[in-house]
Amino acid sequence: MRKAKHPEYQYLDLLKDIMKNGYEKHEFNSGIAIRSVFGRTMRFDLSKDRKLLTTKKVFFRGIIHELVWFLRGETNIKYLVDNDVHIWDDWPYKAYKKLMEEKKVKEMSQDEFIAKIKADSGFAKKFGELGPVYGRQWRRWTASDGREIDQLAWAIEKTKKYPDRKHVVVSAWNPEYVYEMAKPGNTMAIPPCHTLFNINVTDGKLSLALYQRSADTFLGVPFNIASYSLLTMILAQICGYKVGEFVHMLGDTHIYGNHYGQVKEQMKRKPRPFPKVKINPKLTDINKIKFEDFEIVGYNPHPPIKGEITVVGGFNEKDRKDFTYKGKKTK
């Protein structure tokens, strides 16, 4: 019998696809080159092992902390900074730096800024906010009547009671907080890249499909695969089902020009066995989730391959106009 191809080759083949077939664009803020394809899909069966890529070491501790942060509905980086996770540092510092340029705040390096976030809760409350990003939309979506809707609690309840239903979708994409559609000063630090996810139960197995509008394939996608695979496992346990598949659907799927060399190095490496991830069997309430509920076993990856984060997002204020609907209103 022919040996099945290691699932990680889906990712490695995607890197090859982008490098070979990608159309070269330029990033909005920095002008850096981007090689990009559009519309790709990967599928990962989670019933046997956990999808944490092995052709470079992935920062699993950071993945857990970020996911816990999302699931708690938090939007301030202080929790992450306090736990020495710095994947979101650049965005609040970008906003602070703009205030520095306007002579409205004290000048600080990014390292000084992050140290201040850690040491000073008042400073963190004022300058550590990212706006209404993932956790806020998942757990506290603001309704027109002022209510805060807990999409995730609804999704869990529906999935437990009605496993055959097809409408269990959790969305992070809220136009009220996106770029020119938002009121001035009310936009997210960056519109959600992983935009929405759909939960499905088939034959007693819970699967999750993610649509990701924008995918930094070298730095971000390995993180996203691990995070949403773990989320699928968590939801399966909490809802009382076996775990099924994680389906990853990608829109603009790209590699930044300053990562081309690192990608070529990674494509030479052969995948190793995926690790196991253990979840505390007593975890049955999403509101009680904590970092200590998770353990990784047997992770033996290739060494890390470093790459600089490209701080994306933002728009030109000169493009702002009123996008209120001007057509005829119907009852």
Image: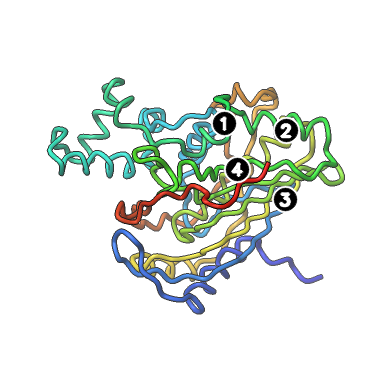
Q: Residue at label 2?
A: 237
Instruction: Give above or below for 27 relative to 245.
Output: below
Residue at figure coordinates x 62%, y 50% from the top left: 51
Instruction: Give above or below for 32 relative to 70.
Output: below
Amino acid marked by disc 4: Ser
Q: Are the residues flagged by discs 3 and 2 in contact, CB closer than 8 Å?
A: no
Q: CA distance from mark 3 to mark 1?
A: 35 Å
Amino acid marked by disc 2: Gln
* Residue 177, image x, y percentages: 46, 41
Quarter that holds the C terminus: top right
Task: Determine whether, in the image, residue 150 is placed left or right of residue 240.
Answer: left
Q: Residue at label 3?
A: 245
Kindly identify which numbered label has been placed on residue 144. 1
* Residue 34, image x, y percentages: 40, 68
Q: Earlier in the sequence, mark 3 or mark 2?
A: 2
Q: CA distance from mark 4 to mark 1?
A: 16 Å
Task: Determine whether, in the image, residue 80 is placed left or right of residue 92.
Answer: right
Residue at figure coordinates x 68%, y 48% from the top left: 49
Q: Classify mark 3: helix, strand or loop.
A: strand
* Residue 2, image x, y percentages: 77, 71
Q: Residue at label 4?
A: 171
Q: Is residue 309 visible?
A: no
Kindly indicate the quadrant of the structure image that contains residue 116: top left
Q: Earlier in the sequence, mark 4 or mark 3?
A: 4
In this view, the residue in front, 102 or 67, is 102
Q: Earlier in the sequence, mark 3 or mark 1?
A: 1
Q: Is residue 141 visible?
A: yes
Local crowd at mark 4 within 10 Å, few (<14), some, or many (≥20)?
Answer: some
Q: Earlier in the sequence, mark 4 or mark 1?
A: 1
Amino acid marked by disc 3: Glu
Q: Classify mark 4: helix, strand or loop.
A: strand
Amino acid marked by disc 1: Ser
